[in-house]
């Protein structure tokens, strides 16, 4: 079976490191991007099984990044991450088809995160 690969897009180094450490421990591949612009460069070159995108990023925010990913014709699953519950960007993400269940609020419950990631990449845990 092909290894499932994640792209973690977050400007918080601790979040990137934590998520990739966990993914690699679970046998998943993981790459990181610090910005929406950096993520788009990677997405143009590779297909990922899942994108984990922080909604609040410097430069292109997470929602703008997702819009550009979709404009490239990429349909990979997405989990949005945020520390802000009542935010216009959360509403905008939902308008792009992101379900409430696909938005993780920081600090997130790691058990829920694991279940969501495995469901999104089509693996059982």
Image (cartoon, rainbow, N blue to C red):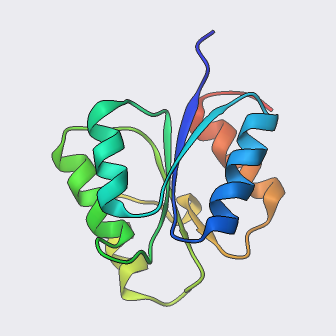
On-image quarter of the C terminus: top right
- Please report the residue visible at 37 percent of the width from the left and 52 percent of the height from the top: 39
Residue farthest left in this picture: 71
Tell me where residue 101 appears, x and y as whole percent.
58, 61
Residue drawn where x is 36% and y is 87% of the image: 88
Left or right: residue 15 versus residue 85 is right
Q: Position of residue 119 (x, y in %)?
A: 64, 38
**Residue 96 visible from this viewpoint:** no
Q: Nearer the viewer, residue 118 or 65?
A: 65
Quarter residue 84 falls in:
bottom right
Residue 38 sits in quarter: bottom left
Considering depth in this image, is 40 or 98 the residue closer to the camera?
A: 40
Tell me where residue 58 sits by quadrant. Answer: bottom left
How far across and how far down the image is residue 49, in percent? 49, 33
Residue at x-position 63% and y-position 9%:
1
Q: Position of residue 46 (x, y in %)?
A: 36, 30
Q: Is residue 111 above or below residue 63?
A: above
The tally of labels here is: 0
Residue 120 visible in the picture: yes
Residue 58 drawn above or below residue 8: below
Q: Is residue 95 left or right of residue 108?
A: left
Residue at the outermost top position: 1
Left of 120 or right of it: where is 107? right
Quick check: 7 above or below 33? above
């Amino acid at each position: 079976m092909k290894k499932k690969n994640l792209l973690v897009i977050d400007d918080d180094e601790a979040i990137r490191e934590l998520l990739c450490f966990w993914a690699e421990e679970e046998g998943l591949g993981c790459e990181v991007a610090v910005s929406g612009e950096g993520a788009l460069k990677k997405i143009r070159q590779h297909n990922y099984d899942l994108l984990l995108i922080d909604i609040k990023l410097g430069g292109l925010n997470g929602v703008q990044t997702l819009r550009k990913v979709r404009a490239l014709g990429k349909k990979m699953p997405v989990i949005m991450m945020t520390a802000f519950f009542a935010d216009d960007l959360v509403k905008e993400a939902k308008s792009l088809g992101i379900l409430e269940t696909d938005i993780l609020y920081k600090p997130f419950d790691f058990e829920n995160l694991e279940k969501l990631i495995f469901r999104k990449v089509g693996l059982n845990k």
